[in-house]
Amino acid sequence: MLLGGPPASGKSTVAEIISSTAARPAVHLHTDSFYVWIRSGFVPPYLPDARRQNEVVQNVMTDAACAYAAGGYDVILDGILGPWLLESFRAVCRERDLGLSYIVLRPGLDVVLSRASGREERQLKEVEPIVGLYGAFENLGALESHVIDSSTQRVEQTAEEIAVGLRAGHFTLR
């Protein structure tokens, strides 16, 4: 499962709940981890100069997620995973005969900015890139049915809505 959305939308918190309470063996992969492992030459991923770095990180994330899935684990990969990344994930999952679901958490921009202001030092808190990244998730066209507005939900409610939707096949990418 890919759990995407803008910064501070609650992806990691929800992914932690889903993976920790899963009935089957589950793995939570946090995309930020794949970036913080870069010790030298790191470029903030939202900058144009990060293109090559982002391609490498996406390949590593995809391989890791697929390896866990092939080993029998349910995988929750959370991060700023927008529609622009879906085709490469779809291709790899088709090639390896793995299912793929996609969910976007999109609380209101005011909620995102409020949450971001209280984030830890290494996490993105700058308003301009957050607003820009939020815009990338505003109009998802055919993928709007994969969006959950978690503005007024408790984290547990969002996790439950995702679990129910996954069981019903609502978030499956075909």
Image: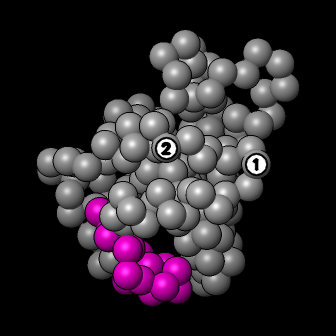
Q: Can residue 163 be spotted in the picture?
A: no
Q: Is residue 147 left or right of residue 112?
A: left
Mark 2 belongs to which amino acid?
Val
Is 144 included in the stretch rendered in magenta? no
At x 38%, y 37%, the residue is 132
- Secondary structure beneath disc 2? helix
Crowding around mark 2 (Cα neighbors within 10 Å: few <14, some 14 to 19, many 20+) is: few
Q: Is residue 71 left or right of residue 149?
A: right
Are discs 2 and 1 less than 8 Å apart at CB?
no
Does 126 appear above or below 173?
above
The magenta segment: 147-164
Q: Is residue 69 or residue 41 the one in the foreground?
A: 41
Residue 52, position as x, y percentages in the image: 57, 14
Q: Is residue 134 or residue 64 the one in the foreground?
A: 134
Does 3 appear above or below 51?
below
Q: Which residue is mark 2?
A: 127
Q: Which mark is residue 132?
A: none
Residue 58, position as x, y percentages in the image: 56, 31
At x 31%, y 47%, the residue is 137
Q: Is residue 36 or residue 83 the one in the foreground?
A: 36
At x 34%, y 64%, the residue is 108
Mark 1 belongs to which amino acid?
Glu
Q: Which residue is mark 1?
A: 121
Q: Which quadrant of the structure image shows residue 62? A: top right
Q: Is residue 136 left or right of residue 18?
A: left
Q: CA distance from mark 2 to mark 1?
A: 14 Å
At x 52%, y 22%, the residue is 47
